[in-house]
Amino acid sequence: MKTLSLLAVLVTTLFFYGTGGADAYTVYVSNEKGNSLTVIDSETLQVLTTIPVGQRPRGIMLTKDGKQVLICASDDDTVQVLDVASREIVADLPSGPDPELLNIHPSGSPVYIANEDDNLLTIVDLETTKVLAEVQVGVEPEGVGISPDGKTVVVTSETTNMAHFIDTETFEITDNVLVGARPRFAEFTADGKHLWVSSEVAGTVSVIDTATREVVKVIKFDVPGVQEIYLQPVGVRVTKDGTKAFVALGPANRVAVIDAKTYEVEDYLLVGKRVWQLAFTPDQKLLFATNGNSNDVSVIDVPSLKVVKSIPTGTAPWGVTISQD
């Protein structure tokens, strides 16, 4: 038995640190209270460096060409542009007040920015850095989802409890879908047929049919030994093949694993304290989860559904994005 245990450890070590493991990507984590980005190598699972940025960095995302990281510096009322090669801030985008989350059109531009304090979606051309439009949405917008065909952007408003569907050509709101209390994140499936919206206070995830704009399923959570008040869904990620979904459950310190076809919860993975946002590596072999109250990220091996590593970061890690190279 001891020999088998030792062999298992060696196999795991070789998988993550040896030669035939997953491809190497660069992971960027925004530290909300540390005013910094932690940069991690996905192959060695080691911190490469820490980069100082603006005040209260939250939502972050790589540009489609992988050359820049966009950072919502919420307390500076701007979106900073980090050059990946030099690891320096090279520009600021006119984001509007208190940017929280953002997303980028599949074509590479524009960028859509949720301005929490002004109830606006600000749309900025990445090449000219000019504001193309400001769309009035519900109170406290946060989540921003983009349909795979680029025709629709969805913004969730935390206080209005709605998912607002906006036409990316006309910038007009085409539908307002009522969801659970305090919606935080919006994630389209790869085929564009469904939108998953997490609702923090309701403790649920609503699955919306994008053709009918109706909620077809409300997913609830039940973690043994955890009070219902702590089941607060935030970040959501669905695999490209549409078979699995992962939901960060905030102070429940769990990531829920869901069958994305049947909507049944299959497992709860124990991670760090107050798990917030999630990001896959491009090959979807690993999932990184930010843990705001334990100041680390948890690394989940997706095929085995096992938490394989905890990596210390700066103070209060919030957002995470991963290189596509």
Image (tube, helix red, strand yellow):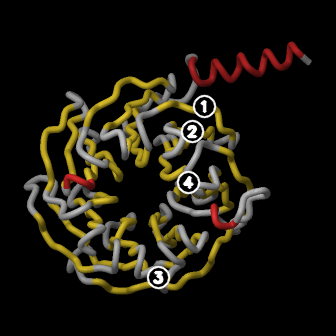
Provide residue 302's location: percent of width, then percent of height.
62, 43
Q: CA distance from mark 4 to mark 3?
A: 20 Å
Q: CA distance from mark 2 to mark 3?
A: 35 Å
Q: Which residue is mark 1?
A: 309
The residue to which callout 4 is attached is: 239
Residue 298 tag number: 2
Name the image quarter holding the N terminus: top right
**Is residue 63 positioned above or below 110 on the image?**
above
- Mark 2 and mark 3 lie on one chain; the one further toward the N terminus is 3
Placement of 206 over or under 14, stated as above or below: below
- Whether the residues at callouts 2 and 3 have beta carbons within 8 Å, the answer is no
What kind of residue is marked 1?
A: Lys
Mark 4 or mark 3: whose residue is earlier in sequence:
3
Labels 1 and 2: the sequence-earlier one: 2
The residue located at (21%, 68%) in the rendering is 122
- Whole-percent x, y for residue 32 in the image: 37, 46
Circle 3 SS class: loop
According to the picture, the residue beneath numbered tag 3 turns out to be: 211
Name the residue: 42% across, 45% down.
320
Name which of mark 4 and mark 2 comes first in the sequence.
4
Residue 177 image point, x, y percent: 45, 84
Q: Amino acid at mark 2?
A: Ser
Pointers 1 and 2 in contact (C-beta within 8 Å): yes
